[in-house]
Image (tube, grey):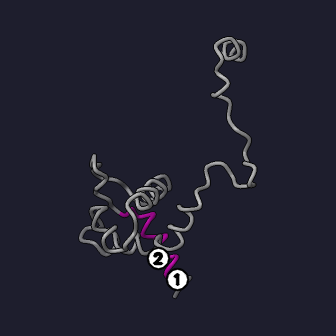
């Protein structure tokens, strides 16, 4: 029944794309996010971990790490989806208040064990 309604109303745009694009890149993968995580991920978590109470404003992280705000917001969204960072207060201008979670601290200590 859903297919008939979709066809009748012309809702083809609701169909999900194939899992790969022509460049063989998975849909949803963001090369800029991957690069940012490699360059700033552990430093981002370390900044929050070392901040008073494990919390900081996003603009303070951006200023310290010299990371573009649009990339920092992607990192926050990604870390939040994994439960590594929690946005405790959202700001309309993007200067969210962030807190590192216990999962984030565990990830940071695992990284320190591997990198050290």
Instruction: Please identify the quadrant where the N terminus is shown.
Output: top right
- Residue 19, percent across and down? 72, 45
Give 51 or 25, whichever is nearer the viewer: 25
Give 43 or 9, whichever is nearer the viewer: 9
Q: Residue drawn at (68%, 30%), measured in percent from left and top?
A: 15
- Residue 74, percent across and down? 46, 56
Query: Secondary structure of the magenta portion, mostly?
Result: helix
Q: Secondary structure at mark 2?
A: helix
Circle 1 residue:
113
Above or below for 72 versus 90: below
* C-alpha gap between disc 1 and disc 2: 6 Å
The part of the chain drawn in magenta is 100-112
Above or below for 11 versus 104: above
**Residue 65 lies in what quarter of the image?**
bottom left
**Residue 14 lies in what quarter of the image?**
top right
- Residue 55, percent across and down? 28, 64
Res. 109 mark: 2
> Which residue is outermost to the left?
52
- Residue 40, percent across and down? 46, 72
For this view, does 107 lie left or right of residue 86?
right
Q: Are marks 1 and 2 in contact (CB under 8 Å)?
A: yes
Query: Is 109 contained in the magenta span?
Result: yes
Q: Residue drawn at (73%, 48%), measured in percent from left and top?
A: 20
Above or below for 87 versus 61: above
Query: How busy is the neighbourhood of tag 1: few (under 14 within 10 Å), some, or many (20 plus)?
Result: few
For this view, does 12 lie left or right of residue 48?
right
Q: Secondary structure at mark 1?
A: helix
Query: How busy is the neighbourhood of tag 2: few (under 14 within 10 Å), some, or many (20 plus)?
Result: some
> Which residue is outermost to the bottom?
116
């Amino acid at each position: 029944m859903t297919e008939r309604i979709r066809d009748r109303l012309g809702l083809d745009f609701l169909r999900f794309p194939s899992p790969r694009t022509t460049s063989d890149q998975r849909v949803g993968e963001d090369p800029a996010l991957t690069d940012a995580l490699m360059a700033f991920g552990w430093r981002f978590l370390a900044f929050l971990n070392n901040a008073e109470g494990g919390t900081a404003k996003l603009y303070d992280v951006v200023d310290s790490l010299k990371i573009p705000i649009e990339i920092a917001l992607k990192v926050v969204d990604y870390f939040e989806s994994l439960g590594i960072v929690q946005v405790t207060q959202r700001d309309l201008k993007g200067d969210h208040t962030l807190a590192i979670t216990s999962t984030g601290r565990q990830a940071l200590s695992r990284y320190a064990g591997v990198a050290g």
